[in-house]
């Protein structure tokens, strides 16, 4: 009975996610984001061509936006630290268990 309720809840959540994604795709949300990127690129091309005509010193960095975004914040740093600690202690535990099993089998 509990498994039936859990299965229904999971299916309901998956269905709601599907509906949200379907609506966002059908309203053109993704296409609008791609259009905005294209528009910025066209503007940068025009700016580049104008600077070349004027004989200015051109550099790629002037026309390309920040390619590497920094998403670090307290939550992500905490998650990274937690993940590294879990990895370290899991590795020690696994090595200990398999070392003991190896000793048991070899003796």
Image (cartoon, rainbow, N blue to C red):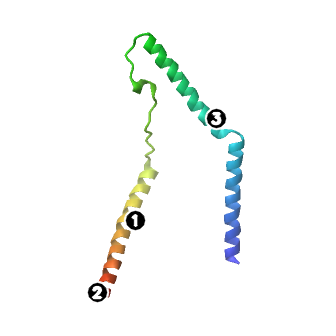
For disc 2, the neighbor class at 10 Å (few under 14, some 14 to 19, many from 20) is few
Residue 83: percent from left, percent from top = 41, 60
Q: Which residue appears at 46% of the width and 19% of the height?
A: 48
Which quadrant of the rendered structure holds the N terminus? bottom right
Q: Which residue appears at 40% of the width and 11% of the height?
A: 55
For disc 1, the neighbor class at 10 Å (few under 14, some 14 to 19, many from 20) is few
Q: Who comes first in sequence, dot 3 or dot 2?
A: 3
Residue 37: percent from left, percent from top = 56, 32
* Image vertical order of residue 99 relative to residue 23, above or below: below
Question: Which residue is disc 2 drawn over?
Answer: 106
Classify residue 18 as left or right of residue 80.
Answer: right
Q: Which numbered disc, 3 or 2, marks the residue closer to the eye?
A: 2
Relative depth, front residue between 40 and 86? 40
Classify residue 41 as left or right of residue 100.
Answer: right
Residue 16: percent from left, percent from top = 70, 56
Which quadrant of the rendered structure holds the C terminus? bottom left
Question: Which residue is disc 3 drawn over?
Answer: 32
Is the residue under label 2 in contact with that under label 3 (CB below 8 Å)?
A: no
Q: Which numbered disc, 1 or 3, marks the residue closer to the eye?
A: 3
Furthest residue in direction bottom, as rendered? 107
Q: What number is the disc on residue 86?
A: 1
Identify the element where label 3 is drawn. helix
For disc 3, the neighbor class at 10 Å (few under 14, some 14 to 19, many from 20) is few
* Image vertical order of residue 52 relative to residue 68, above or below: above
């Amino acid at each position: 009975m509990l498994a039936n309720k859990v299965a229904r809840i999971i299916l309901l959540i998956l269905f709601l996610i599907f509906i949200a994604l379907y609506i966002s795709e059908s309203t053109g949300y993704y296409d609008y984001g791609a259009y905005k990127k294209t528009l910025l690129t066209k503007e940068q091309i025009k700016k580049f061509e104008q600077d070349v005509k004027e004989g200015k010193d051109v550099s790629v960095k002037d026309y390309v936006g920040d390619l590497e975004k920094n998403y670090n914040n307290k939550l992500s740093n905490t998650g990274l630290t937690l993940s590294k600690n879990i990895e370290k202690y899991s590795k020690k535990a696994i090595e200990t268990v398999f070392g003991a099993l190896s000793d048991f089998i070899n003796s």
